[in-house]
Amino acid sequence: MDDRQTDIRPAERLSLVQEYYFSRKLKEVARLNAEGQDIISLAIGSPDMPPSPATIERLCDVARQGDAHGYQPTMGTPELREAMSRFYKRWYGVTLDPGKEVLPLIGSKEGILHVTLAFVNPGDGVLVPNPGYPTYTSLSRLLGARIINYNLREDNGWQPDFDELEQMDLDGVKLMWTNYPNMPTGGNARMETYERLVDFARRKGIVVVNDNPYSFILNEKPISLLQVEGAKDCCIEFNSMSKSHNMPGWRVGLCATNATFISWILKVKSNIDSGTFRGIQLAAAAAYDNDEAWHKEANIATYSRRRSIAEEIMDVMGCTYDPAQVGMFLWGKIPDSYPDAEELTERVLHDARVFITPGFIFGSNGRRYVRISLCAKEEKMRQALERIRQAL
């Protein structure tokens, strides 16, 4: 650094977070690959299949139009909002006013930022699941919120312990993050859980935000928090096209709730972004109308074949797992012979040249678990299986 810049320091908030685990670890994997290690990654949930042909065709058609490349409304095009509304009615039986109760997002991670900014003042409390998606914690910290973890445990099906929640000091808590079907554990959504969450939100004056991107992956009966009567009054739901429509790089998601909440979130969002390319929005609208056969092949059949291989990998590593879990990962408990999950994942990385995820990155309740992504071709997964079998 130039001597003239020695007095420049980063904002204090940077001391509250670390570089995202995968950002840091992928640098190591890249270095190992540069050395000729040929690492097979079964770590990140980035779908490796394309969207439906109709989705791609619509994107190309719009991109060829000369007037399609200007700024777009932050609220999203009417076509996209209407498609999102149709999607919720078709699959969940939930009615959403496309003009007032649904807001397109540049992915759910953006939604976490916007909702926190809209509802949480510095010092306010935010309930975050343990284990849970790390961004719930990191963005809350960056924005000055108090993180209050609540436990998810295997013996409770990775559902919230409502008796424990009732005993917690919830003074000043504004938001509660939930994520069903759950990542990383694969615990499925339950209508009983959703009903209790709505009751909890109403009684405690807390906004429950359910992050729901996995409801179509290895799951024959997708459900939504908004199916519960009165949920829109006190709850928000995110949904994402990244997993269910094979569109992670497109960055298209949605936020659904009551019109007042949407107006608050839009006030934040409109000061941060300038809308998404029209071609992406109209192609996403086409994707929301994919037929049921496409979903069954992409989200059920393909992942079922991969899941069976992932289960073999867990067996070889001596891990136990719940066969009823859903989503695009397999979550397993490590053998007692390992002091923690990272010892196993590091051995698998360096001895078998396979990258899997240690559960500690999702919270202390994930310390003795590992996660395998199903986002790799069957041939690669079988190759990973053989490498691990030989190494262990």
Image (cartoon, grey):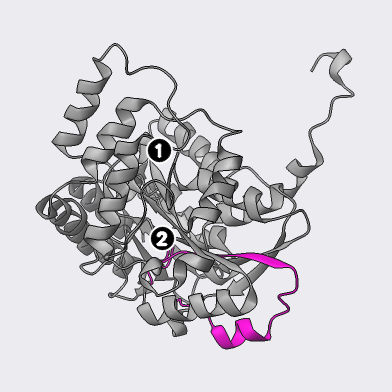
Q: Circle 2 sits in a helix, a strand or a loop, which is it?
A: strand
Which residues fall within the magenta stretch? Answer: 158-187
> Which residue is painted at 58% across and 88% down in the image?
163
> Which residue is painted at 57% across and 69% down in the image?
130
Q: Determine whether, in the image, residue 143 is placed left or right of residue 84.
A: right
Residue 172 drawn in magenta: yes
Of residues 86 and 302, which is closer to you in this image? 86
* 100 w.r.t. 129: above or below: above
* 68 w.r.t. 137: above or below: above
Of residues 127 and 319, which is closer to you in this image? 127
Number of residue marks: 2
- Of marks 2 and 1, which one's residue comes earlier in the chain? 1
Q: Residue furthest top?
A: 66
Residue under pointer 1: 251
Residue under pointer 2: 371
Q: Determine whether, in the image, residue 309 is placed left or right of residue 182.
A: left
Quadrant location, the N terminus: top right
Amino acid found under the numbered disc labelled 2: Arg
> Which residue is painted at 21% across and 52% down in the image?
382
The Cα–Cα distance between marks 2 and 1, rounded to whole angstroms, is: 24 Å
Q: Position of residue 21 (x, y in %)?
A: 56, 47
Q: Determine whether, in the image, residue 31 is placed left or right of residue 352.
A: right
Residue 384 in sight: no
Image quadrant of residue 328? bottom left
Q: Circle 1 sits in a helix, a strand or a loop, which is it?
A: loop
What predominant SS class does the magenta segment belong to? loop
> Which residue is painted at 74% across and 61% down in the image?
124
Q: Position of residue 201 (x, y in %)?
A: 56, 74
Quadrant location, the C terminus: bottom left
